[in-house]
Amino acid sequence: MRFLYKRQPAEELQLELRDVRQAMSSGGLVLFDLLFYSFIFAILIMPMQAGFMQFSGLFLLVYGAFTCLFLFIRRSVNKYSGTNKFMK
């Protein structure tokens, strides 16, 4: 069965891996993930008797903090590495 499947050349595999790496480290995807994880985090730490306004405020606070942390880390890495390739 192994002989029936033709492997791709190594160059094509490297190009595919590069594309996947770029997509996984893109800023938009990271911010979308932060939105999802902030929602989960806000649900987990919200007390049961709190209202929707408290949940909304907590969610925005957590998302804002995580976003600021991500942007600070991205700026610091770009500043000290000398390249702007990391997480554009």
Image: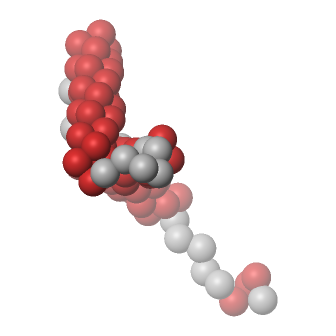
Does residue 73 appear to the left or right of 46 in the view shown? left
Q: Quadrant of residue 5?
A: bottom right
Q: Quadrant of residue 72?
A: top left
Which residue is at the front of the view, 39 or 85? 39
Q: Residue at x 49, y 60 (%)?
A: 13
Q: Residue at x 26, y 34 (%)?
A: 61
Q: Position of residue 29 (x, y in %)?
A: 30, 51
Does residue 65 appear to the left or right of 11 in the view shown? left
Which residue is at the front of the view, 45 or 16? 45
Q: Position of residue 26 (x, y in %)?
A: 28, 46
Query: In which quadrant will I find the C terminus?
Result: top left
Q: Is any atom of residue 12 visible in this view?
A: yes
Q: Position of residue 59 (x, y in %)?
A: 30, 43
Query: In which quadrant will I find the N terminus?
Result: bottom right
As drawn, 81 above or below 39: above
As drawn, 48 above or below 76: below
